[in-house]
Image (tube, helix red, strand yellow):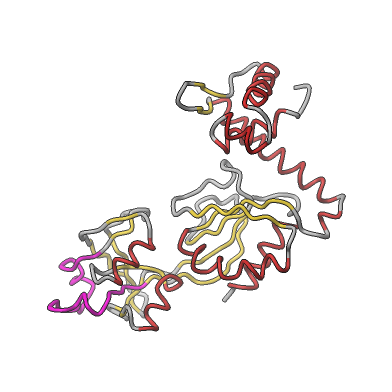
Amino acid sequence: MDSLDGLPIFVRTVREGSFSAAARALDLTPSAVSKQIGRLEDSLAVRLFNRTTRRLSLTEEGAAFYERASRILADLDDAAASISSLRAVPRGRLRVTMPSGFGVIHLLPVLPAFYARYPEVALEIDLNDRFVDMVEEGFDVALRIGDLSDSSLIGRRLAANRRVLAAAPGYFDGVAPPQSPADLAAHNCLVYTYRAQRHDWHLVDDAGSETVVTVGGTLETNNPMMLRGAALAGIGMVLLPLWLIGPDLKAGRLHRVLPDYHWPDSAIQVVYPPGRHLSARVRCFIDFLVERFAD
């Protein structure tokens, strides 16, 4: 390939999902973007995109090239940072992905302090409760709750993650509270659909003994904020993390159910892809999260 000129346009087109969206982001015309992609395909002698009138999708070769191209651009960015003042003064755009509830409840309130400290860093924050392949989708930093399924990522622990059973006081009007995990099968348990084996609730007691109970109810959703809202409305019982419902428990809006039991503990981690060094903006964001949230 004669030139790297087409790489940034190709990567942005993949991330934006269309030539027109990439053109707007890059302040180019759609025809200019299309022409650059065509030149890149000619240079590589492969087709990178499947083009139809309704959608644009990567070919198998395009997907493989995107992963390598993203890394190349990241390495170029880091190389430039290492020989310029960017290493001393964090600046530039940082792409971050994290669970929606954590972002709204915990990150949003501390953003003013972050921007006051690092005014030249621009954050692009994706709030998403599904699993995000941060390398494939071009994210610099991710906040993960639970074990890392990708062992190639580097993680720094922020805090423990404990999920507990809870319900609003009104839920128990005329309903007997459960006395043991087995009793949950008779209750309206609201289910989080992004969890593997969503209907099997694993509960451990203070002695570390684990019980698995199969539950079900009138609401299943992929959004923990909706589960919290449904619990506050007295619709049913939830199994949610303390970072989400801790204030509700303290205020009495929700009450612990089976307080001697909880979901097996995991960790809240901030993760990033491996590399020879971190750019200043990545390092400052990670250090800020550790400073603010580490337990």
**Residue at the image point whose x is 38% and y is 83% from the top:** 251
**How far across and how far down the image is residue 217, in percent?**
21, 61
Say above or below: 46 vs 12: above
Position of the N terminus, as image quadrant, is top right
Q: Which residues are magenta?
A: 164-189
- Report which quarter residue 182 is drawn in: bottom left
Quadrant occupied by the C terminus: bottom right
Question: Which quadrant of the view contains residue 292?
Answer: bottom right
Task: Say whether residue 92 is left or right of residue 252.
Answer: right
Q: Position of residue 156 (x, y in %)?
A: 61, 64
Q: Position of residue 99 (x, y in %)?
A: 48, 58
Percent position (x, y) of residue 55? Answer: 47, 27
Which residue appears at 43% of the width and 70% of the height? 244
Depth order, front residue of 14/277: 14
Q: Nearer the viewer, residue 194 or 196?
A: 194
Q: Residue at x 73, y 62 (%)?
A: 119
| Vertical arrangement, residue 31 with respect to residue 108, above or below | above
Q: Residue at x 32, y 70 (%)?
A: 203
Q: Indicate yes or no whether the magenta region holds residue 188.
A: yes
